Image (cartoon, rainbow, N blue to C red):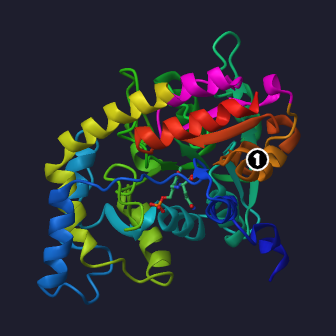
Amino acid sequence: LVPRLRPFTSTIFAEMTALANRTGAVNLGQGFPDTDGPAGMLRVAKDAIDGGLNQYPPGPGTPELRQAISEHRARYGTHHDPDTGVLVTVGATEAVAAALLALVEPGDEVVLIEPYYDSYAASVALAGATRRTVGLVEEPGTGRLGLDVAALAAAFGPRTRAVLVNSPHNPTGTVFTRDELAAVARLCVEHDVVAITDEVYEHLVFDDREHVPLATLPGMAERTLTVSGAGKSFNCTGWKIGWACGAPELVGAVRAAKQFLTFVGGAPFQPAVAHALRHELDWVERLRASLQDKRSRLAAGLADAGFAVRPSEGTYFITADVRPLGFTDGEQLCRELPERIGVAGVPVQVFTDHPDEWRHLVRFAFCKRDEVLDEAITRLRRLG
Ligand code: PMP
Ligand code: GLN
């Protein structure tokens, strides 16, 4: 393995899921739902297979799906030509990787907000670029993990080529406010930097918060590549249908890289996701409301078990400080938890370049049936 990929030999999700399976633990580590997506969407995929849609679809995605994605983005007021401004990818992960390969040269710098979703650092390394990380900071009083605008500004320099912005944010559950995003936008315009957004949790925002796409802010339409996907909105993380939208020059560049990574993505899932984007948004609203309740349920359970819980404003993750329980190292705790009490979580420090600053936080996923969450809560209480 080449040196630049050596830090990335295994993912924490695979490790923790394997440990949970081995020990029979309740898996609140890897984020995937334990119920299916809308029945109508599943039916379209099954019909597509029966109807013979089993060979390569068009490279950039089926015209029907690109049209549906374009219409879906129009709800935010952004307009993307389905032919030149939309690209279907193998999950959001491929969209981010292809974007970095297409837009960043070896030696360029890419700004990441820390903690960052694990694939970003690996994809920056694949592109031969260097990452500059900017840590979220705890807001006094609420504990919300917010953007440190001064630190972000300090991370932009002459070699900065791109910034990756994930909101709603995994692993913290922070939903960036319009003001926070405006600060990102100002820096991108000032330094002529491309923004790659990861909006896979765009529908999963709580307590009347609003998801603001960075591309809608002044000066950003032409310099933002917006990435999202179907997995989180429609409980189909295993289908791996994602997309990238943006100005034709940006999307064309990503398409050039994507065609030699995977060429195309799964044919029968594309009509199903097109159906879901057009007809299942009421279903998504019910999912959102139910996840909001699950967030509150797990937050209360974790607090009751003795954790100091940080606010989760969206996604299906919540973070908890392990120090009030007398622990100091979240990673060590996560490696012990399955055996000790039968629950798996994920340490936040593995999503960072500064483990000492994040050692106290553990991420738990709440996209699980209520009885599964309740069982986890009962077990977590045994820690105290
Ligand atoms: N980005 C973020 C922030 C995620 O949480 C996930 C899901 N784990 C992904 C990307 C990956 O999405 P996909 O499965 O569509 O590649
Ligand atoms: N996105 C999910 C998470 O953050 C899982 C992704 C994965 O297994 N790579 O937990």
Q: Inspect the image, locate mark 1, and give the three-letter code of the amino acid beneath it.
A: Arg
Q: Quadrant of the C terminus?
A: top right
* Region in magenta: 298-326
Q: Residue at x 77, y 31 (%)?
A: 322
- Residue 317 highlighted magenta (yes or no): yes
- Residue 166's quadrant in the figure? top right
Q: Nearer the viewer, residue 379 or 366?
A: 379
Q: Which residue is mark 1?
A: 340
Instruction: Specify whether residue 221 is in view.
Output: yes
- Residue 217 highlighted magenta (yes or no): no
Q: Residue at x 80, y 47 (%)?
A: 331
- State the image coordinates of residue 174 (x, y, percent, origin top left): 55, 31
- State the image coordinates of residue 39 (x, y, percent, origin top left): 18, 57
- Residue 5's quadrant in the figure? bottom right
Q: Residue at x 67, y 70 (%)?
A: 127
For residue 29, above or below residue 363: below
Q: Residues within 10 Å of mark 1 (few under 14, many from 20)?
A: some
For residue 167, above or below residue 94: above
Q: Is mark 1 within 8 Å of ligand 2?
A: no
Q: Secondary structure at mark 1?
A: helix
Q: Residue furthest top?
A: 141
- State the image coordinates of residue 147 (x, y, percent, origin top left): 64, 28
Q: Quadrant of the N terminus?
A: bottom right
